[in-house]
Amino acid sequence: MRAVQFLFSGMMAACFLLSGCAQHPSAPPAGGAGDLSLTAPRHGDFGHYTLALTWQPGFCTGPEGNSCQADQPQTPLIGLHGLWASRPSDLIRAQVPVTTWWRKGCSLYDGDTASASPSLSEGLSHRLSEVMAHTHSSLVAHEYTKHVQCFGMEGEQFFSVASRLRDRFAELPSAQHLNAEAGTRVTKAELTSQIEADTGPLPERGVQFQCNKTPQGEAVLSQIWFTLKPASLDTFPKTDAFLSSPQMQDNCPAQFLVPQWAAAGAHL
């Protein structure tokens, strides 16, 4: 018996040192199948998610100029705004307009409460500070209060999934090409084609673009919105993850500027 125990201990030590079997089989590796799923314990019968990614220089630009804090990171350029559940079926049956849901979100269930930051690990909090815009009030708290808490989803898992979906897009050739286009004007058709070269053919309004206006009135890219199947998040960014958005929400003209950060830390 002692010989067997010694042999087993030696095998485990070797396994650990070689790292070939250090990961327990019940814990899928990052990016593996099933590890980007979300379950909403309440009001979970919504039709789609909107994955809202930001083009940070444009997201921080508004008619009055810079709308982000002075400590806004200038990298990465592609950030995370949020992952938004569509209107649950009980609100549809109650004939609550979709625009009211967009405006009020979880306050329709929870009442108007002040934004509250979720309890997140130090590592995830740091990651979100890198990829979410430093708006004048906490964007993480706003997103949790408006788009997460009424569904009963745990904040750590939710923001982990949302940030990893962002990472998956940011790693695509089309996203890296977009980074290289900073400071130039592109057409909506060109940008859509580049994304579809990576994802495969997308349904109508599977991807939509949001633009802000500079103080001079020029349209600049601020966000990219993807319409996703709730049960297929793990297949993103492939075609099978996408749905056609029920609403037209694209407000960019046919051609627009992909802005870059201005010199000396000043924003566009």
Image: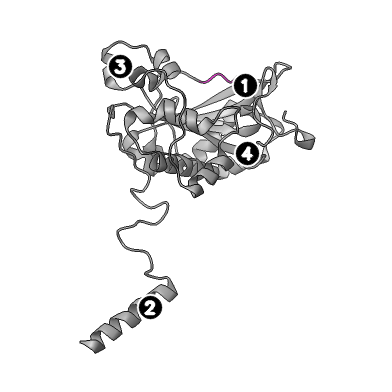
Q: What residue span does the magenta drawing correspond to?
A: 250-254
Q: Earlier in the sequence, mark 3 or mark 1?
A: 3
Quadrant into which the N terminus falls: bottom left
Identify the residue shown where x is 36% and y is 39%: 154
Judged by depth in the image, the label closer to the viewer, 4 or 2, is 2
Residue 237: where, in percent of width, then height?
44, 41
Left or right position of 245 against 181: left
Taking the magenta stretch, the answer to whether it contains residue 220 is no
- What amino acid is labelled 1 in the image? Asn
Residue density around tag 1, few if under 14, some if 14–19, many if 20 or more, within 10 Å = many
Amino acid marked by disc 2: Ala
Secondary structure of the residue carrying tag 3 is helix
Q: Position of residue 113 (x, y in %)?
A: 42, 21
* Percent coordinates x, y for residue 4 in the rendering: 24, 85
**How would you classify the magenta stretch by its main secondary structure?**
loop
Of 146 and 221, nearer the camera is 146
Q: Residue at x 34, y 36 (%)?
A: 153
Badge 4 vs badge 1, beta-carbon distance below 8 Å:
no
**Residue 164 coordinates in the image, percent (x, y):** 46, 44
Say which amino acid is labelled 3: Leu
How far apart are labels 2 and 3 at the CA level?
A: 56 Å
Residue 252, magenta (yes or no) = yes
Look at 56% across and 32% down and name the residue there.
54
Tag 4 residue = 77
Dot 1 or dot 2, earlier in sequence: 2
The numbered mark, 4 or 2, whose residue comes first in the sequence reads: 2
Where is mark 1, residue-wise? 212
**Residue with the mark numbered 3:** 91
- Residues under labels 3 and 4: Cα distance? 36 Å
